[in-house]
C-alpha cells in the first residue's frame, strides 16, 4: 500500500472520529454523507467525505478557494451532475433516502433542497413572477393562491415591506442585497426543507450582508441551512456547526464554537489563525 493511500485511510478514520465530536445523539440529520468521492473527468475533487448534517441548524463550510466547498454543496441536490464529466462514488442520504438511487427523481430532490447562489440571479421578470415561477411549475395556477404564496415567501425573506408596492416592477431594478433576498424568497416559494447557500453575501455590501445573516438566523427555525462561506467571521457569527475543507477533504467538522476555539487538527488551526488561505 502506497504512502498516499495509507494517509488517505488514516485521514478517513480521523474524519469519522472528528465527525462524532460534539454531536447530539438525539439530533435528526437531514443529510448523511458517507465516503463521498467526486471526479471531474480524471481529476478528483472530493476525497472520502463523510459528515452528518443536522436538521434545523446552520451548517457552515469553510476553506480556501478551490478546496471543494462549492462542489460538495452542489452534490447535495445533484446540481453537480449538470457537468457531463462528473462521476461520484459513496453515499448521500437525504432524510434516510439514497439520493443517487435511480428511483429518486432529481426534480423531487431539488424541490426539497433549494439553492441560493453566490451572485443574485433573479429572472428578467417582475418581482411577483420571480416568486410565483416555482409554484406555477408545480401546477398552481389560481391567482389568489399565488398571491398568498408570494406574500408569504417575501415575508419569509424579510423583504415584503420593501417591495409590496413594487410587485409588478422588474426585479433587476432592486439593489444587489434586495435581489439576493428575492432569490431566497423564490427558493422559499416551493416550500423546501433545506436551503443551500453558496457564498450568498460575497457580492454584497456590509449592510446587505448583515440583513442576509439576520435572515439566515430567522430561517433556521423552519429550515435546515448549509452555507459555503469564504468569511470565517461570518461562519462564527451565524452557524451552529462548521466543516473545514482542504484539498478536497473534510479535515474537521464540529460545533462552531469548538472548531474555532479548540481545533483538533493542526491544518484547521493553521487556517483559522491565518497561516494560509
Image (cartoon, rainbow, N blue to C red):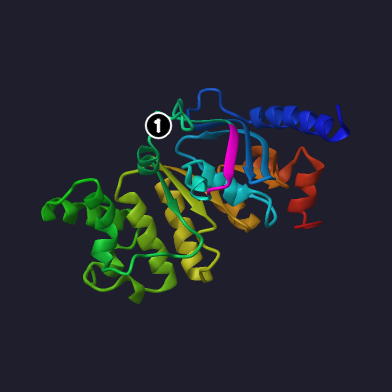
Residue 107 spot, x, y in % from top left: 36, 41
Q: In this rendered view, identify the residue nearer to me: 205 or 38.
A: 38
Magenta span main SS: strand
Residue tagged 1: 104
Mark 1 crowdedness (10 Å alpha carbons): few <14, some 14-19, many ≥20: few
Q: Is residue 202 left or right of residue 270?
A: left
In this picture, is 50 found above or below 223?
Answer: above
Does the image show residue 211? yes
The quadrant in which the C terminus is found is bottom right
Q: Quadrant of residue 11?
A: top right
Q: Quadrant of residue 7?
A: top right
Kindly state the secondary structure of the residue where label 1 is placed: loop
The quadrant in which the N terminus is found is top right
Q: Quadrant of residue 34?
A: top right
Q: Residue visible at 52% across and 47% down?
A: 80
Residue 203 spot, x, y in % from top left: 53, 68
Q: Residue visible at 39% across and 67% down?
A: 179
Residue 90 spot, x, y in % from top left: 60, 30
- Give the magenta range: 84-89
Q: In this rendered view, identify the residue nearer to me: 79 or 185.
A: 79
Does the image show residue 256? no
Q: Is residue 240 magenta?
A: no
Q: Is residue 85 magenta?
A: yes
Q: Residue visible at 44% across and 65% down?
A: 120
Residue at far bottom of view = 173
Q: Residue visible at 49% across and 65% down?
A: 119
Q: In this rendered view, identify the residue nearer to me: 230 or 113.
A: 113
Amino acid at each position: 500500500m502506497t504512502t498516499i493511500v495509507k494517509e488517505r485511510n488514516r485521514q478517513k478514520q480521523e474524519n469519522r472520529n472528528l465527525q462524532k465530536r460534539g454531536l447530539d445523539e438525539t439530533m435528526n440529520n437531514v443529510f448523511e454523507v458517507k465516503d463521498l468521492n467526486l471526479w471531474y473527468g480524471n481529476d478528483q475533487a472530493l476525497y472520502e467525505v463523510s459528515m452528518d448534517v443536522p436538521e434545523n441548524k446552520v451548517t457552515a463550510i469553510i476553506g480556501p478557494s478551490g478546496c471543494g466547498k462549492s462542489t460538495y454543496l452542489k452534490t447535495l441536490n445533484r446540481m453537480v451532475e449538470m457537468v457531463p464529466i462528473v462521476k461520484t462514488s459513496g453515499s448521500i442520504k437525504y432524510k434516510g433516502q439514497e439520493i443517487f438511487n435511480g428511483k429518486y427523481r432529481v426534480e423531487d430532490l431539488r424541490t426539497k433542497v433549494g439553492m441560493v447562489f453566490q451572485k443574485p440571479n433573479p429572472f428578467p421578470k417582475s418581482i411577483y413572477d420571480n416568486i410565483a415561477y416555482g409554484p406555477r411549475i408545480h401546477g398552481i395556477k389560481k391567482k389568489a393562491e399565488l398571491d398568498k404564496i408570494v406574500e408569504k415567501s417575501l415575508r419569509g425573506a424579510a423583504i415584503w415591506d420593501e417591495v409590496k408596492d413594487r410587485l409588478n416592477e422588474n426585479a433587476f431594478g432592486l439593489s444587489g442585497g434586495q435581489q439576493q433576498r428575492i432569490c431566497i424568497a423564490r427558493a422559499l416559494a416551493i416550500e423546501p426543507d433545506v436551503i443551500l447557500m453558496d457564498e450568498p453575501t460575497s457580492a454584497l455590501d456590509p449592510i446587505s450582508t448583515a440583513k442576509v445573516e439576520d435572515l439566515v438566523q430567522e430561517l433556521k427555525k423552519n429550515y435546515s441551512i448549509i452555507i459555503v462561506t469564504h468569511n470565517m467571521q461570518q461562519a462564527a457569527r451565524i452557524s451552529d456547526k462548521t466543516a473545514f475543507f482542504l484539498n478536497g477533504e473534510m479535515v474537521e467538522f464540529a460545533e462552531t464554537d469548538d472548531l474555532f476555539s479548540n481545533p483538533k487538527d493542526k491544518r484547521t488551526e493553521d487556517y483559522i489563525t491565518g497561516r494560509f488561505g
